[in-house]
Amino acid sequence: MFETIIIAVLTSSIVTGLMVFLFKVYFKKLIEEYFVIRGDESKFQRNIRNKYQETAINSFPEVSELLYRLTVITKHADKHADPRHWNPDIRDLTSEFTDWLFRHRYYIAKNIFELLHECKRTLQDYLVMYDIATRQDPNKPEGFESFVNKFEKRSHRIEEIHNEVLKTLKIIAKGN
């Protein structure tokens, strides 16, 4: 009976020792694979950086399309003093652009984000003009007509920002 207990203890000790050794080898390899620095960065860090860059690059075509469409709409708006003649898509596209900017703000370089944020503010100015002009309420805010006449047309700035985004996209594409 004593021999049986000794055999059981030795067997479990050997099995436990082998399992510890195998887990140690496995986890060591796993840790090296993801966290041990090889050169300047670990594979884990490279994977994160690559995913970040991939997300940033993949987001540019969508914003480029939105900016192009908004440039066309604001150019049309600049030619028509009365906002009631503007393209009503300005509302949905400005909202879509704003949503895009919030979703992708962490993936955009600071200088590009600042340009796009400026564009968003400009588009919101257009949108305020459009919303007030197309209200069902015939009573416009006092001074609205004067404000419409003094409203600075800025479609050219939206077009400049669009071109800057395209230029950045081309630079990024050449780098990959």
Image (spheres, grey):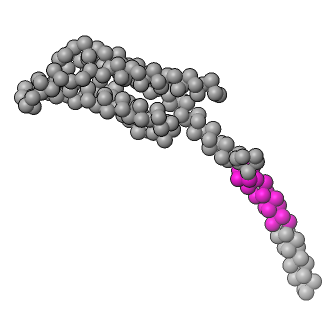
**Front-most of 98 and 116?**
116
Q: Is residue 28 magenta?
A: yes
In the orientation shown, which residue stands out farthest toward the bottom?
Answer: 2
Residue 86, relative to residue 10: is it above or below? above
Residue at image coords 55%, 30%: 57
**Front-most of 18 and 57?**
57
Q: Quadrant of the N terminus?
A: bottom right
State the image coordinates of residue 16 (x, y, percent, origin top left).
Answer: 82, 70
Residue 89 in view here: no
State the image coordinates of residue 78 (x, y, percent, origin top left).
Answer: 26, 16
What is the quadrant of residue 28 in the picture? Answer: bottom right
Q: Which residues are magenta?
A: 18-36
Residue at image coords 57%, 39%: 52
Q: Quadrant of the C terminus?
A: top right
Q: Is residue 16 left or right of residue 57?
A: right
Q: Is residue 83 left or right of residue 101?
A: left
What is the quadrant of residue 174 in the picture? Answer: top right
State the image coordinates of residue 160 (x, y, percent, origin top left).
Answer: 41, 21
* Main secondary structure found in the magenta portion: helix
What is the quadrant of residue 17 in the picture? Answer: bottom right
Residue at image coords 21%, 24%: 151
State the image coordinates of residue 175 (x, y, percent, origin top left).
Answer: 64, 27
Residue at image coords 34%, 26%: 93
Q: Is residue 141 magenta?
A: no
Residue 40, relative to residue 11: is it above or below? above
